[in-house]
Amino acid sequence: EVQLVESGGVVVQPGGSLRLSCAASGFTFDDHIMFWVRQAPGKGLEWVSLISWDGDTTYYADSVKGRFTISRDNSKNSLYLQMNSLRIEDTALYYCAKLATAVQSDYWGQGTLVTVSS
Amino acid sequence: QSALTQPASVSGSPGQSITISCTGTSSDLGGYNYVSWYQQLPGKAPKLMIYDGTNRPSGVSNRFSGSKSANTASLTISGLQAEDEADYYCSSYPSSSTHVVFGGGTKLTVL
């Protein structure tokens, strides 16, 4: 059974830092590009970042570029998101995901809630 | 990285068919992009309903179908059922895998 389990979401003050983790199982993790997607309360889905299978290539949404860093450890089947200089507008449920391409494999975690508040 | 455009809401009666549109530029929805549709129930993670524009994952009802042209993708749900009431999102990302763009979401109400 495929599982993606996120952790690390907490309440943090503006300007603070946080590291999210995602533990993957049930599929060949190091074969795939991985993603972070977030959803602010009552709002739609927003792509945050993606990382190549080997970790060498990363991309970010403009809204987080320069503040967030995605990484992975294929030996631990884990994905990470280092979040710095957090803003109130970063408050959201953060999902770890492997998105479908021309094949149907598409996996999402249950999300971890990050709340940025003073 | 502009969002794809979806109607905020659509509605239909049980048994009817509805179509949700997703519009963007040809660079967002054209041939080298992976276009997917997701269903999201309250408090749940998104569920894949259509991938690669027109393909239905195993286990998804054949009442769901997708189509795609140069700058528009569409999700059609036929024979509407109460359980279809949810938020629906389109997404697209290029085969070069440089970014992902989501639509703003459409709330489907089954009357």
Image (cartoon, coloured by chain):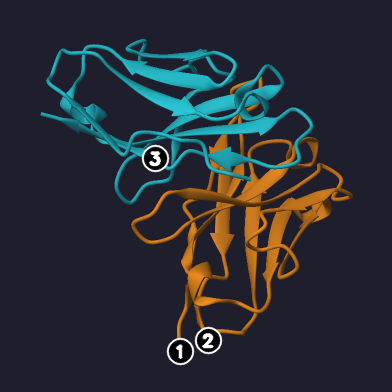
Chain colours: A orange, B cyan
Q: Work out how far the residue at label 3 is from the one at label 2, CA to CA, in angstroms.
A: 29 Å
Work out whether residue B60 can be spotted: no
Q: Is residue A103 left or right of residue B88?
A: right
Question: Do pointers 1 and 3 mark residues of a single chain?
Answer: no
Q: Work out how far the residue at label 1 is from the one at label 2, CA to CA, in angstroms.
A: 5 Å
Q: Residue at x 84, y 50 (%)?
A: A55
Question: Which of the 4 quarters of the picture holds residue B34?
Answer: top right
Work out whether residue B94 can be spotted: yes
In this rendered view, identify the residue nearer to me: B52 or B101: B101
| Residue with the mark numbered 2 | A13
Kindly give the residue lying farthest to the right in the view shown: A56
Whether the residues at callouts 1 and 2 have beta carbons within 8 Å, the answer is yes
Nearer mark to the viewer, of 3 and 2: 3
Which kind of residue does numbered mark 3 sit on?
A: Gly
- Residue A66 in the image: x percent, y percent? 75, 68
| Residue with the mark numbered 3 | B105
Q: Secondary structure at mark 3?
A: loop
Label 2 Cα neighbours within 10 Å, binned few <14 / some 14-19 / many ≥20: some
Q: Secondary structure at mark 2?
A: loop
Q: Quadrant of the N terminus of chain B?
A: top right
- What's the chain of the residue with tag 3? B
Q: Residue at x 37, y 10 (%)?
A: B62
Which kind of residue does numbered mark 1 sit on?
A: Ser
| Residue with the mark numbered 1 | A118
Q: Residue at x 40, y 34 (%)?
A: B6
Kindly give the residue lying farthest to the bottom in the view shown: A118
Q: Is residue B42 left or right of residue B54?
A: left
